Image (cartoon, rainbow, N blue to C red):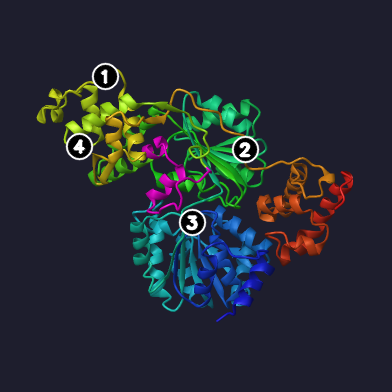
Amino acid sequence: MFPPEKISATLSEVFGFTTFRPNQEEIVRAILSRQNVFAIMPTGGGKSLCYQLPAHMLSGVCVVISPLISLMKDQVDAARTNGLHAAAFNSTSTLAEKSYIRDALHGNTLDLLYISPERFNSEHFLERLKTLNLSFFAIDEAHCISEWGHDFRPDYLALARITDEFPDVPIAAFTATATLRVAEDIVTRLQLKNPHLTRASFNRPNLFYQVFYKRRFDGQLLDFLDRHPNESGIVYRTSRKKVEETAAFLQSQGFSALPYHAGMTDEDRHATQEAFRRDECAIIVATIAFGMGIDKSNVRFVVHGDLPKNIEAYYQETGRAGRDGESAYCTLFYGRQDITLLAHFVNKIENKQAREVAKEQLRHMIRFAEQDECRRIGLLRYFGEVFPATRCDHCDICGGEVEREDATIAAQKLLSAVYRTGERFGATHLCDVVLGEVTDKVRQFRHDQLPTFGVGKDRPLPYWRMVINALVSQKILAVDDPKFPVLKLTENAWAILRNKQRFQMLSQQSHPKPQKSRVFDVRPENPARGSNPLSERLFQRLRELRKEIAATENLPPYVVFSDKSLREMSLKFPKDRDAFQLISGVGRHKLESYGDTFITAINEYCRDNSWSQ
């Protein structure tokens, strides 16, 4: 058993951190004590450290099973810059690299070996693994093993063999998104006996969520990007055609933007991905084909130009922003045409059960987009988590960045329809009633005879859908059973029906412009203030230096130092090694590799600006 002080010393000396993030320490201790582990941790929660630190401390090699070559490369680069001995064995490995890996494995000098699930399933490779001293297996993106997961990959099913083939080697499985059903499936398939279970909060407090009704998307996107200059981000579109059009538009407006979708050649996709990783391209416009293989920590915004098909996909994609823990924006633009298109695709699903699941997922996604309550509360509720406050103060709803309209009369019409139909029906039927649609169901229950039949003809169906979603989110209507979404009146509903309370909902007529970016709080550079002001100019200078070093060493810039580390340097102005090693993310190896170069740049900056402290 490793003493706590030894673990803390490794965290500081190797990774440059003085404290663990939530849940990390418990997971590290479990792995070091050779327990099986299953952890659900949000993107940016520090999953890689949970297995990299024990891999460095334990005897033998940790075999990391990862889904994509590009993701392996990022993680190997990051591990090596921290002084760990890491390598990836895949189809791109050269003969020299394979020879190095073989020597390192048999010499027991490798901490981490990254492989794909396909490689693990090779009988020849499996037999070779049995000859090695293995510390444990780490499975990244473990939700891919579950058929209930949103990124199911058949090749992951081979990982069920680990326990049978290596009964004495522990397994640590990690994922960022998994419902309870998926989590149970993962534990069962991997045969994890008495695992240490961690289900971390899905809350990403550094992400700012905002939703806008889509009218002229190109203009809205430009307005957003003008408020996020010199920042790296991803713009998601639902089709290849939209990707190409949006990328071309941004290029015509002077932005460094490239398209990415499955219709491109492998070479073009790889070139685009590398340009983004190396900060040579600021913005990627992509379909959902892009993202899983990216470990880029300094993505400052993720924009959805169309409504995602479900909350899981939305959460996974927005999770690519702010992985370094710094502030980032998650901005969704949606329109009724998005809902119509997605509903069309859902209805074309042949399997009835899958179709019903997809319908329910789409309903949740629409409700999130149209809810008039804290975005974070609604998002966490989907994953079965209760936010411990009534507001987060880090979304458009809580920040007052939305406009509302009085819809009391519309609410009264809809609530009256709920009451007069006996609180026995769902949204579709109730909309038919207020719109005056003579459907078979309406005739069957003689609801065309009700006083509320047709009272909403002056408004289109999407409007009444919005009213219902707003009434549900404000707890004026309740859904008792998600499987049978019958709408019920609450006490708040009676106050509105009796004209004792007004009802407001989000307006679609005009949306405010996004507020100025909260990503970087620029304060006046005034040496006479006697404090350490945060310097945007120094931060940009250090970013340029980082990019130069990364190009020389053939690394992505964020692997050298994260934005968070650079921001801290810009605040604290470390002028010698003792001060520099106190910066978050500066371990022993990075201090030796880059410390003097950055210290010199900081001292030159202070001298050039006549700044003394």
Q: Nearer the viewer, residue 159 or 143?
A: 143
Q: Nearer the viewer, residue 374 or 513?
A: 374
User: Disc 1 or 2, which lies upstream in sequence?
Assistant: 1
The residue under the point 76% across, 54% down is: 572
For this orientation, the residue located farthest to the front is 500
User: Which residue, given by chain and number where applicable, does mark 3 sit on?
Assistant: 67
For the residues carrying marks 4 and 3, which lies nearer the camera in this image?
4
User: Which residue, given by chain and number where applicable, does mark 4 sit on?
Assistant: 425
Mark 3 surroundings: few (<14), some (14-19) or many (≥20) residues within 10 A: many
User: Which residue, given by chain and number where applicable, does mark 2 sit on?
Assistant: 517
Q: Which mark is residue 520?
A: none
User: Which residue, given by chain and number where applicable, does mark 1 sit on?
Assistant: 457
The residue type indicated by label 4 comes to: Phe
Q: In the image, which residues are magenta?
A: 366-394
Mark 4 surroundings: few (<14), some (14-19) or many (≥20) residues within 10 A: some
User: In the picture shown, does residue 293 fall above or below 17?
Assistant: above
The residue type indicated by label 2 comes to: Ser
Question: Could you tell me which secondary element the residue under label 3 belongs to?
Answer: loop
User: Disc 3 or 1, which lies upstream in sequence?
Assistant: 3
The residue under the point 42% across, 40% down is: 373
